[in-house]
Amino acid sequence: MSSAVATRGPVRVVGTGLLGASVGLGLATRGVDVVLHDPSRTALALARDVGAGRPAHPDDDPPTLVVVAAPPDVTAQVVRDELAAHPGAVVTDVASVKGVVLDELRAWGADLTRFVGSHPMAGRERSGPSAAVPDLFVGRPWVVVGSGESTPEAVLAVRALAVDLGAVPVTMDAVSHDAAVAVVSHVPQVAASLVAARLRTTPPEALGLAGQGLRDVTRLAASDPALWTSILAGNAGAVRDVLRALRGDLDTVIDALDQIDAAVTWDDIELGALATVAQVIADGNTGVARVPGKHGGAQRTYEVVTVLVPDSPGELARLLTDVGHAGVNLEDLQLEHSAGRPVGMAAISVLPGRSEHLEAELTARGWRLVS
Amino acid sequence: MSSAVATRGPVRVVGTGLLGASVGLGLATRGVDVVLHDPSRTALALARDVGAGRPAHPDDDPPTLVVVAAPPDVTAQVVRDELAAHPGAVVTDVASVKGVVLDELRAWGADLTRFVGSHPMAGRERSGPSAAVPDLFVGRPWVVVGSGESTPEAVLAVRALAVDLGAVPVTMDAVSHDAAVAVVSHVPQVAASLVAARLRTTPPEALGLAGQGLRDVTRLAASDPALWTSILAGNAGAVRDVLRALRGDLDTVIDALDQIDAAVTWDDIELGALATVAQVIADGNTGVARVPGKHGGAQRTYEVVTVLVPDSPGELARLLTDVGHAGVNLEDLQLEHSAGRPVGMAAISVLPGRSEHLEAELTARGWRLVS
């Protein structure tokens, strides 16, 4: 495969965890000479073994690009050291917070003309170099954050890195980036953790009533505390601002529920309290409708066809084969399971106007529909 | 199909929205004589047309069981009227709040020996009688809440109703039920709405960075404001109590982020502030691990194999067919889409120890793995 990065010289990857090793592996797969460095000799050896590149050696040609893939809390100092050690190289990092890194580099007087921040919006449930995969970034946004002093060539080199790895480069400044990830990533993480934390003392029989809604809201709560402490601390101001606004809404809901709870009968409830609760749900409607769906742009309202699926190997494949035969494109798929039952439900999202045809086709093929 | 309910006489369903019409349709499918009533003649006619039963007539035999499927805020008065009008009948309701209904009935001196509350944990994205399906309750928990004075026969009749509709009856008292749904359903709804409400003013380029995490956390935020106002108002005390506890944790996080934001460099951050943030994420880990997964019991830690899937009809089916051929049972499936890219990712959850074999099989069949 051709590579804009490959034409310029070795790429040095510092930090060979999941992201660094995946960058190395993705570039190496495309024929780039990748040299690796990690303070952990084990991580370095593992990254080499998965094909992410070769350990750095004093006789190497100087790198033209350095990718720092260290934890957020040490990223700035590693970037500073790499800028100093490789005066001909463009240096980028992949930390999920950008302002704090730039602020530290500026305070230390680092050469910001050769520094461009990155934030590839990609990850996996596993971590470490052995979890590395070359296609981790394919199709994902890759935020490119100039330092304000970055040369156009430095920005271009980092955009080329993103493109070479199959990602979609998105240019933003550090403040906009940090505000964006606060609201679309960091606050949802905190919310998921807070809701899940309430389940620590919930009786098992109550947990047995849980449905897909609870599982969706709390899935992120399984995230790694050390990593997320570092991320949230690195974006503390922006996250706090969104959480404060959220707390304002939460206080309003709590006060309204308090008024409602104090009423003796439904007729005693003040209408204002009910309207307050309704407004919070309506505001959520407005917000969620703006989240991009599968094909970009505002989320479409799909029609959903729900089908009972026996819980045995091959049944879901058979169902999806029948969906394909019906000539209907599947836009999304959610599996819903019932605790202790040998049957699941598959909720198939299709474009508006396609559900009736699909329902008829699936019924004709013997499937039992729920919705 | 045989039916415990069918042997005893007509079942009267009052309120023919999604739940009432689905109860009627499910019973009628099993040969039960179902008579329908709804204050809306349109809803009644639609329910009849989908096969949920026949409109009630003055010459009907008296019902042995009445199912009240009215909105939560009018459920108690409909139950009271039905208990009075049908002195030989057991009456149940399907409202998603239980204490407030029972309290009102008790205050009015209703005959609680013949009343048993229900809460089938089932629903659909569409509403109204035309969305009714006979299998709506199949495999779902159906909470049965005695009044404290309910006769054993009355409780048995309602459990039989649940079983006839394919549901799994779960006995709870009203207070336990309301506390349970507050934490597993109502608070997650509020949290999803609050997070989504923050997105109303988020710039489109920031929303473009959204991933599956945000979509998961905010999916419930699309819920109907009128219905949810009624539900939250009907469980105001229990929901408020959980939200207050959640707000306590939220305040702790905000305070810690405030301290961290005030620090000039990473080294100035007080360790206590970082530990506080880490504890909230860790508490979320503990809570989410208790949510039952597909097969009941505590959630298993699945291994996830992520595969790149071209966005064309039949590709996902072909993938799942190959998973089946590999002899690996699919425990869960999540589709991850990339805005504007013609490729998606399918995250296949399998039992621990099965992912390596699956990865090898899928690679051999030409699939590109991401994880």
Image (cartoon, coloured by chain):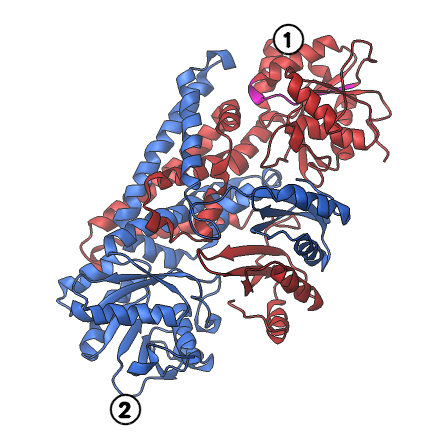
Chain colours: A red, B blue
Q: Which amino acid does label 2 sit on?
A: Asp
Mark 1 surroundings: few (<14), some (14-19) or many (≥20) residues within 10 A:
few
Count of all numbered marks drawn on residues in the image: 2
Identify which residue, A180 or B267, lies in the foreground: B267
Q: Is residue A319 left or right of residue A215?
A: right
Q: Is residue A253 left or right of residue A41?
A: left
Vertical comparison of B222 with B273: above or below: below
Q: Do labels 1 and 2 share a chain?
A: no
Q: In this view, does B107 lie to the left or right of B362?
A: left
Q: Position of residue A116 (x, y in %)?
A: 69, 22
Tell me if residue A15 can be seen.
no
Identify which residue, B279 or B247, lies in the foreground: B279
Vertical comparison of B37 with B329: above or below: below
Vertical comparison of B9 with B290: above or below: below
State the extent of the magenta-drawn residues as a range.
A65-73
Chain bearing mark 1: A
Q: Nearer the viewer, mark 1 or mark 2?
A: 2
Q: Is residue A203 left or right of residue B147?
A: right
- Asked where in the image residue B225 lies, by quadrant, the reply is bottom left
Q: Position of residue B350 (x, y in %)?
A: 58, 47
Q: Which amino acid does label 1 sit on?
A: Gly
SS of the residue under disc 2: loop
A30 falls in the magenta region: no
Label placed on residue B59: 2
Separation of marks 1 and 2 at Cα, in angstroms: 92 Å
Q: Where is residue A322 in the image (x, y as percent from the top left)?
A: 67, 67
Mark 2 surroundings: few (<14), some (14-19) or many (≥20) residues within 10 A:
few
Chain bearing mark 2: B
Label placed on residue A109: 1
Q: In which quarter of the image is the N terminus of chain B?
A: bottom left
Q: Where is residue A230 in the image (x, y as percent from the top left)?
A: 52, 23
